[in-house]
Image (cartoon, rainbow, N blue to C red):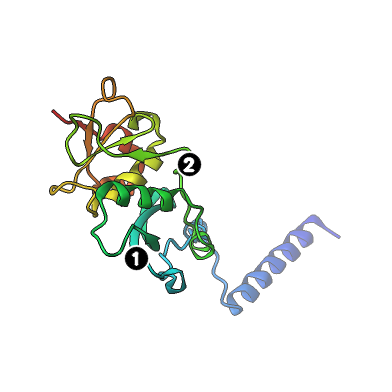
């Protein structure tokens, strides 16, 4: 069999394959096809509040959890104190912090939520000579993981814990060495919570 005949046969075979591909609706292309990013398993859709968890002395609260490098609000049922009296800001802060320390519920975890607030984080009311709306953490805010600090700030911001301007005043345990700073939950912080640790403004 001559080389020329082999080349002719090869050309005929190539043409036949091209015709078959065209008949099947397949179009050749030299440009890579971008199918988009792989779908994320985290929906980050806040689950409905679990009504069965509510009861005497419990009320619906909003806390911020982590999901896909952001912080987003979810609803929980929490005990804020004696329902006959208005809950004090410190008691509210402690109850909200307790919710942040809890692991996500099954529904929250399924949606991709988690928390960076660890069990050792605690909070108390103002020290002597502090403003009434000040809160003291058991470590300086700068020593708390930024993601956890962002959760705390944004969870407190829309409650009686914050001042009239929506700012949360936090300090460390030592009133002599740990100055108070005011923190504000902004849209930028919710999108990029790592900025929280450097966002405080000294309270004069």
Would residue 188 appear left or right of 15 to someone viewing this image?
left
Mark 2 highlights which residue?
A: 118
Query: Vertically, is 180 above or below 19?
Result: above
User: Does residue 94 appear in the picture of this structure?
Assistant: yes
Q: Residue furthest bottom?
A: 23
Density class for disc 1 (Cα within 10 Å; few <14, some 14-19, many ≥20) is some
Q: Which residue does the numbered mark 1 point to in the structure image?
A: 60
Residue 192 seen by the camera: no
SS at mark 2 in the image: loop
Image coordinates for residue 172, horizontal then vertical, percent: 32, 29
Question: What percent of the width, then of the height, locates residue 1?
Answer: 86, 60
User: Where in the figure is residue 68, as x and y percent of width and height?
Assistant: 44, 52
| Rendering quarter of residue 183 | top left
Q: Quadrant of the C terminus?
A: top left
Q: CA distance from mark 2 to mark 1?
A: 22 Å
65 or 187: nearer the viewer: 65
Callouts 2 and 1 close, C-beta under 8 Å: no
In the image, taking residue 26 as reference, residue 45 lies left or right, namely left
Residue found 39% across the figure and 29% down from its top:
143
| Residue 85 x %, y % | 24, 60
């Amino acid at each position: 069999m001559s080389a020329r005949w082999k080349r002719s046969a090869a050309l005929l075979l190539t043409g036949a394959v091209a015709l078959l591909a065209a008949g099947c609706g397949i179009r050749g292309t030299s440009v890579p096809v971008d199918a988009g990013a792989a779908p994320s398993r985290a929906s980050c859709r806040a689950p409905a509040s679990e009504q069965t968890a509510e009861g005497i002395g419990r009320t619906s609260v909003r806390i911020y959890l982590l999901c896909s490098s952001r912080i987003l609000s979810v609803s929980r049922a929490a005990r804020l104190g004696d329902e006959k009296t208005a809950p004090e800001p410190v008691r509210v802060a402690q109850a909200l912090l307790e919710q942040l320390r809890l692991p996500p519920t099954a529904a929250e975890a399924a949606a991709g939520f988690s928390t960076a607030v660890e069990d050792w984080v605690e909070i108390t009311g103002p020290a002597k000579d502090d403003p009434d709306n000040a809160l003291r953490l058991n470590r300086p805010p700068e020593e708390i993981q930024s993601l956890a600090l962002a959760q705390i700030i944004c969870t407190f911001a829309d409650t009686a814990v914050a001042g009239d301007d929506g700012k949360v005043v936090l300090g460390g345990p030592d009133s002599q060495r740990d100055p108070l700073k005011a923190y504000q939950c902004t849209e930028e912080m919710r999108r990029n919570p790592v900025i929280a640790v450097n966002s405080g403004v000294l309270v004069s």
